[in-house]
Image (tube, rainbow, N blue to C red):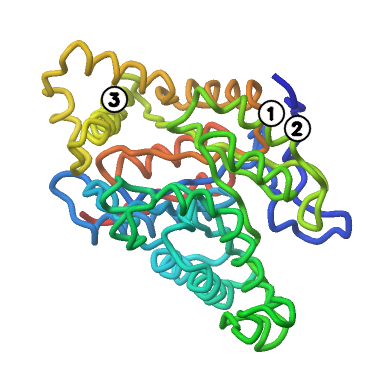
Amino acid sequence: MRGTDDSRGADARDKTGATDEIRGTALGTAPVPLSVLDLVTVGTGRTATQALSTSVALARLAERRGYHRHWVAEHHSMPGVASSSPAVILAHLAAHTDRIRLGSGGVMLPNHAPLVIAEQFGTLEAMAPGRVDLGLGRAPGTDGPTAAALRRTERLQEGADEFPQQLAELVRFLDDDFPDGHPYARIHAVPGPVQGPTGRPPIWLLGSSGFSARLAGALGLPFAFAHHFSAHNTIPALDLYRDSFRPSAVLDAPYALIGVQAFASEDEKEARRQVLTGALSMLRLRTGRPGLIPSPEEAEAYPFTPAEREFVDSWLSNVIHGTPDAVREGLDGLRKRTGADELMITSNAHGAEARLRSFALIADAYDLPGGDEGAGAPTE
C-alpha cells in the first residue's frame, strides 16, 4: 500500500491563500476532513416527506458540527431511498444551510444529457455560489430494466463506455467553450458563462473499481471511492488513481475521499442493532427484494438462512460501528490503511433520531465544533 502520509488533507487553502473548493480542513482531532453521504433513506412506517426532512436536519447538524460537505446519491426504483433527484434535493438543502459544501455523490451521467446536468448544476451554483460539488458516476444507480427506462435504450454498456466523451461534453457546456464549427458551439448552458462571469462547480469522479480511478488521475481531478460497498477494491483503486495522476489546473496533487459506513451509539449493542437494519436492507436488494429500510425489531426477528447470515456478517465487517471511541478508532485505522484525504460517512439506519445522534457522537469523538447544541432531529 502506498500514499499514507498523515499530513494529507490538513490544509484547505491553495497557494494564493484562498479557500480551496476541493480540499477541506481537518477540524478538532480528526486526521482529515469528515463529510456526509446521504441516501435519504426511508424506513418502514415512515414517508419520503419525513426522510427529506431528516436530510435537512442532517445537513444543518453537519454544517454546525464542522463536517466539510454533504453529498446526495442518485438511486432509482429503490423503495428504501428517496434520492432519485439529487439536484432537486440539493436545492432544498441549499435553502436551509449557509456554509457547508453540497454536492452529488453522485449524478450518474449516462442517465442524463450532459446539457441538462450543466444547467441543473449551473442553477445550483447560482443559488449557492462557491459551495456546490458535481460528483459524477457512470453506473446506472439502479437495476437493468430501470436503467433502460431512464436511458430509453437497452444498450446500457454503451452509455458506460461513452462516459469519457459525455464528461468532456459536460465540461464544454459548463465552461461554454465548444470550438467554432462544433455542432453545439451556439448552444449555451444557462445559468452559465454566456450570462457573464460565474463560478463553476468542481467536478469529482466517483467509482467502485479502477475505470474512474484511472480517468480521474489522467484528468487531474479529485476522486471519490465507494469503500462503503466495494471495500475489497479500495486500496487497488486508490493506488491506481495516484499512479495515474497528472497535475492539472484543478489539482497539483491527488486528492481522494472514500465513502465509509459508520454508526455510533453510547451502547455497543444498540449500535449493532441499528446497523443490522442496513445489512438486511442490502441483503434484500442484492437478492432482488428491495424494500424500505427495516426497523431494528424487524431485523432482529428476521430468520436468516446460513447463506444470508454469512452475507450479513461479511457486510457488517466493513461497517464501523460501536461506541464513539470505537468508531473513532475504526475510522482512524481506515484512514491510515488507505491514505484517504477525506472520509465521507454514511449511515443507513432505520430512524431519523438514531442517524442524527450517530453523526453528532462521531463529531463529539473528534472534538468538532458546536458540541453544545442539540442534534436538531425532526419531528416524526
> What's the amino acid at mark 3?
Glu
Question: Real-space Cα distance between discs 3 and 2?
Answer: 41 Å
Q: Which one is nearer the viewer's eye here, 211 or 370?
A: 211
Image: 209 above or below 128: above
Say which of 169 and 116 sits in front.
169
Rendered view: 283 above or below 60: above
Neighbor class of circle 2 (other Cα within 10 Å; few <14, some 14-19, many 20+) is: some
* Mark in front: 3 vs 1: 1
The three-letter code of the residue at mark 1 reads Asp
User: In what quadrant of the picture does the C terminus appear?
Assistant: bottom left
- Which callout, 3 or 1, points at the residue further toward the start of the chain? 1
Badge number at residue 243:
2
Mark 3 or 2: the one toward you: 2
- Whichever of labels 3 and 2 marks the residue nearer the N terminus, that label is 2
Q: Position of residue 24 (x, y in %)?
A: 68, 48
Disc 3, SS: helix
Q: CA distance from mark 2 to mark 1?
A: 6 Å
Q: Which residue is at 24% across, 61% downward?
A: 49
Query: Which amino acid type is marked by label 2?
Result: Asp
Residue under numbered circle 1: 239
Image point 61% across, 52% down: which residue? 204
